[in-house]
């Protein structure tokens, strides 16, 4: 006759099983450290993302309550602006989570200024149009947006045989700054890098970016040089415009400022599909 297991023996069995499992996991981690490390990184990234998404709305609400003139920076990276609501899809210290491809977690008409530098080229054309429409939605009537992004026409213009001194200097400085390899056709190399590297997905011409802004409902759309503005809030705001790459940036960067009108005009449907 088999003796009945006692509570102590049951506990011992459970603890033994846990010990064996932990030992197996530990042995696996030692033998396959690469797999264990990847799993840990994935878990860490997942938890970080969840925490950022959870904290984002609270940070945004606190900023909106504390500021009468509200300024939103999208895709801040590590370039926090004092007095701004600095946001990013991977927020760091003092930033709120914001996915530029999703609905902005803030009320209609709650923001007075929006700014993003070299962001819109990292999302698709349709996502970019949706982001501009969301920007229009959250801007108060009379609110302004400033967009800085690579200018595709500048890169295409490098392929002409007769180049200006500015274009010649840009090619030399661009290749040297990135430490790119010398090729028989540096114009081709530069164009391919701008279209495919750094997570770029869609690079605009002035014509298409202006049309996108118009389709979102913006008016008083003005093309400007990097770092320049008639509005003190935007003047000198670009990070690249006053860095060691300011000359490169001035050549290759397209800047638009646009206004949400006080009295909205009918929104064009030509680009809404």
Image (cartoon, rainbow, N blue to C red):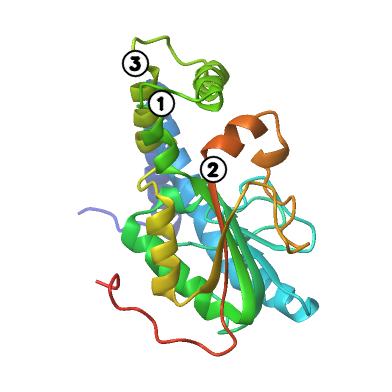
Which of 84/49 is in front?
84
What is the number of the mark on residue 190?
A: 1
**Residue 155 placement, left or right of 108:** left
Around disc 3, counting alpha carbons within 10 Å, would you say few (fewer than 14), some (14 to 19), or many (20 or more)? few
C-alpha gap between disc 3 and disc 1 = 9 Å
Q: Quadrant of the C terminus?
A: bottom left
Vertical relation: 193 (above or below) 50: above
Find residue 153 and report its horizontal and vertical position in percent: 40, 41
Residue 148, given in percent of the width and then of the height, sits at 56, 51
Q: Is residue 101 visible?
A: no
Whether label 3 touches label 1, CB < 8 Å: no
First of labels 2, 3 by sequence position: 3
Residue 185 is labelled as 3
How many numbered discs, if any?
Answer: 3
Residue closest to the eye, 171 or 137: 171
Residue 170 shows in this picture: yes
- Pointers 1 and 2 in contact (C-beta within 8 Å): no
| Residue shown at 36% from the left, 27% from the top | 160
Q: Which residue is mark 2?
A: 253
Q: How busy is the neighbourhood of tag 1: few (under 14 within 10 Å), some, or many (20 plus)? A: some
Q: Regarding mark 1 in the picture, which secondary structure is present there?
A: helix
Sooner in the amino-acid sequence: mark 3 or mark 1: 3
In the structure shown, which secondary structural element does the residue marked by tag 3 occupy?
loop
3D distance between C-alphas at marks 1 and 2: 14 Å
């Amino acid at each position: 006759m088999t003796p009945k297991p006692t509570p102590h023996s049951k506990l011992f069995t459970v603890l033994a099983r846990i010990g064996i499992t932990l030992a197996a996991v530990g042995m696996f981690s030692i033998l396959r450290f690469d797999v264990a490390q990847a799993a840990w990184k994935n878990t860490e990234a997942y938890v970080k993302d969840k925490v950022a998404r959870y904290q984002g709305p609270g940070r945004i609400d606190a900023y909106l309550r504390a500021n009468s003139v509200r300024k939103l920076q999208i895709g801040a990276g590590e370039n926090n602006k004092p007095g701004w609501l600095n946001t990013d899809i991977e927020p760091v210290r003092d930033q709120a989570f914001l996915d530029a491809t999703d609905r902005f977690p803030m009320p209609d008409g709650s923001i007075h200024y929006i700014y993003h530098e070299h962001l819109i080229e990292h999302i698709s054309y349709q996502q970019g149009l949706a982001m501009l429409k969301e920007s229009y939605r959250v801007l108060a009537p009379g609110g302004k947006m400033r967009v800085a992004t690579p200018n595709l026409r500048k890169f295409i213009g490098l392929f002409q045989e007769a180049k200006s001194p500015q274009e010649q200097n840009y090619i030399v400085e661009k290749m040297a700054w990135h430490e790119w390899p010398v090729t028989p056709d540096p114009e081709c190399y530069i164009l391919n890098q701008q279209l495919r590297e750094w997570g770029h997905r869609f690079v605009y011409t002035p014509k298409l970016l202006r049309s996108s802004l118009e389709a979102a409902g913006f008016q008083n759309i003005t093309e400007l040089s990097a770092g320049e503005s008639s509005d003190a809030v935007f003047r000198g705001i670009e990070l690249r415009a006053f860095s060691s790459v300011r000359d490169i940036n001035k050549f290759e960067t397209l800047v638009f400022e646009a206004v949400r009108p006080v009295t909205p005009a009918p929104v064009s449907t030509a680009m809404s599909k």
